[in-house]
Amino acid sequence: MLGYLIRRILAAVPVMGVVALFVFLLLRLTPGDPAAILAGDNATPEQLDRIRTSLGLNEPIYIQFYTWIAKLLHGDLGVSLISNKPILEMIGPRLEPSISVALATIVLSILVAVPLGVIAAWKHGTWIDRCVMGLSVLGFSVPVFVIGYVLIQVFAIDLRWVPVQGFKSISAGFGPFFERIILPTCTLSFIYVALIARMTRASMLDVLGEDFVRTARAKGIGETGVLLRHALRNAAVPVITVIGSGFALLISGVVVTESVFNLPGIGRLTVDAVLARDYPVIQAMILLTSGIYVAVNLLIDLAYTLLDPRIRY
Amino acid sequence: MTNTNSSNVVLDINNLIVGLGRKADAHRIIDDLSLQVCEGETLCLVGESGSGKSVTSLTTMGLLQKGTLVPSGGSVKLVGEELLTATDRRLRQLRATRMAMIFQEPMTALNPVVPVGRQIDEVLRAHTDLDSRARRQKILAMMEHVRLPDVERIFSSYPHRLSGGQRQRIMIAMALVLEPKLLIADEPTTALDVTTQKQILTLIRDLQRDHGTAVLFITHDMGVVAEIADRVAVMRHGRLVEAGPLQDVLRNPKMEYTRNLLSSVPSLVPRPPRPETKEPVVLEANELSKVYRERSLYGKAREVAAASNVTLTLRKGRTLGIVGESGSGKSTVARCIVRLIDPTSGGVRLAGREISDLSRRLLQPHRQKIQIIFQDPYRSLNPRVTVGESIAEGPINYGMPRKDALARARELLELVHLPPDAISRYPHQFSGGQRQRIAIARALALDPDVLVADEAVSALDVSVQAQVLNLLDEIQRRLGIALLFITHDLRVAAQICDDVAVMQRGRVVEQGPAAEVLTNPQQAYTRALLEAAPGRGWDFANFRPVSESALATA
């Protein structure tokens, strides 16, 4: 197991290397002079020259890549072109809102979606099943921002249960923190619940047709035992896979949700950077999200081995 | 029915009707079935696929899919207690305590993600108040009772770590741990090799003798019936054809259907050998080997020899059988010869031309000389392509105009005794036997010199099996084709092969004329295989034991 873990982490190195190369080339291969892109339309030749020297653009390209990677490995993500602040410092305080909402979404979605999927599969073909599937289609088809605004209108403006927008750190107390992330979490959960519930139902339906489920019933085990002890664990692998690949969905969802709820998270930072063509920040954000994605996939592969003893690496 | 003492009847099924759906006029899957199983008795329920054997057992257990199959009449009584009207709760209480069931596929019948010991433990937790230590002791004792080795290790093993036979022993331990009155065994040995099958049948017999369990044993295999039954009940289309003590049914079957069923069972005594021929050799395998290497990115490589140094010769118009248990490498050899997989070393000569080292492209013209038929006719035909297209595809690939190819397909369908209109229909519109005929027609479409049949009749009912074997025989006589016949079934091999090669763990252990190898085996392994063949004491087709047949022919 430990050997497998080490092998998998080693295998992630080339993946991240390719991502880094791509991110590096992103700026170098964009048509035109990177310095001119960075400096904007009204730059003087002296300014361009200064940017070129500071970015090392006069060096051969492989030297540039080497220095860039070396800095990266030392935690130096560069400096924002707009605010002139080190990017690491810009990202730091913005991680909490994003990670809070993302984790809360995953937890909430799993808690809601897995039971829904299990019940839908158990009551396959009945009105309960059709309701769950109908909700799931709704969750897929309504855009995230629409759900966000509807929730704000109902719970923040009409009922006044929670603040409309903004964020309070958990260090300021759980109450204020919780009431500000609950709506963004619900918003983001919609599509995620739809995805996971659908997959859970399909996977459970497959498993409920298996011989060992019949064996469990033949042993005189009650329905709850059959569903949870025998079926669900076997149905878990595809569900976990979807939870993992749905993470990409979550990252893009965070961007929209943070704009709707005015959360100072990394999604907002990314949007601002793209609008301002702040290339070093964009690069850092791509690296960060790819890193998270690779890490999540690693965790999911590890979860497989815990769930299914037949999977051994 | 029979004069059984009513006091010790364990399972009593009377006039049972099971319909497809709830409507009163629903199609009847079980139609007016009555049978009894007494304490200490084994009743074999025999019939071909679709005869309703499994539905009968699932009805008894209360495991029918709700709403799809509905018992609409009659009664099923377990030690006097009516089961059809019992509540779900009561049925759950009865399962594993009064009645238990073991299933056909030990590979899929156990939960793959739970250690087997815990799966047995569940039965005890659901039905007893024993503490965990008492439960564990009881389970280990039971596991020893079903003759599992190293019970402590197996207790905490996952199913995929165990062999098929071991898993079936776990199933039996699970079924019998609470000493139920009734054991329903639904084809429990069908998926096992003959030697394992023999062990499991002996085990069930012994346990039954020790505990006085009533056994309802469902099977399609007359050989197994002869081994284990006290009484036999024959089913067809959901109805009882006839029932009676084993000797009566095997010796004096009263009904036409039973007679036909018994006559279809191929004999273990090889058919009279055909004269040796001087026809040219069409297929030769020389020291053929296939080694699988498992390699991981950073790990060490592991080697498995699926076939090693296999040498075979096949002449025009002859049939060579490769027999062996699962994992013996017989299918690997077949696939290497057809070049569906590439042999690691050794040679294959097809009509005098070495083909083992040809590239895919250079191999192309030789492919039409050798064709293969697979085991499962339900999966080997593309469901979205019409039968005619499937058959014609080969010739079209080799440049035959489409019109001619379809005309040829029509001729071939006639050759395999299918109606000409079959050409525009789809595979799902045919039965298993018909599909296998289509697969044969497809293989013949390219006029091959050699036809490879990989367990081609194993998935078929005996009566259909007999028809397909006759068809292959007829085709061989008419077209002079050479047949390489892969099978695990010695009865089938005895009836179709001129020569036989016995394989074990990738090697040919014995090879020679079928009449010699199967009557006077030289190797211990071949002898063990023959001895394990169920019902070898019976000459089913002549309704008498083999010893009497020998007297009759002497």
Image (spheres, rainbow, N blue to C red):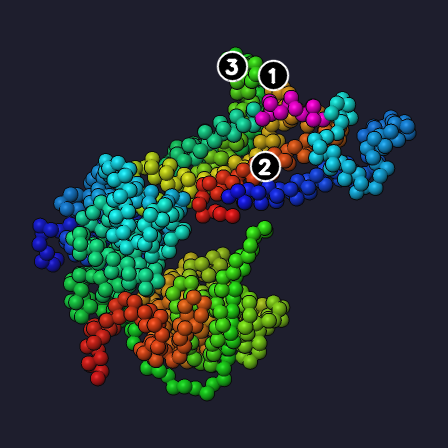
Classify 10 Å Cα crowding around label 2: few (below 14), some (14-19), many (20 and above): some
- The circle drawn on residue A166 is 1
User: Of marks 1 and 3, which one's residue comes earlier in the chain?
Assistant: 1
Q: Chain of mark 2?
A: A
Q: Find the residue positioned furthest to the bottom.
A: B278
Image check: B329 left or right of B208? Answer: right
The residue where tag 2 is placed is: A295
- Judged from the image, the secondary structure of the residue bearing numbered disc 2 is helix
Q: Nearer the viewer, mark 3 or mark 2?
A: 2
The amino acid pointed to by label 3 is Gly
User: Of marks 3 and 2, which one's residue comes earlier in the chain?
Assistant: 3
x 19%, y 55%: residue: B208
Q: Nearer the viewer, residue B434 or B300?
A: B300
Q: Chain of mark 3?
A: A
The amino acid pointed to by label 2 is Ala
- Judged from the image, the secondary structure of the residue bearing numbered disc 1 is loop
Q: Are marks 1 and 3 on the same chain?
A: yes
Which contiguous range is marked in magenta?
Answer: A87-99
Q: Is residue A288 visible?
A: yes
Q: Is residue A241 visible?
A: no
Q: Is residue A264 above or below residue B291?
A: above
Q: Position of residue B43 (x, y in %)?
A: 19, 57
Q: CA–CA distance between discs 2 and 1?
A: 29 Å
Q: Position of residue B372 (x, y in %)?
A: 48, 69
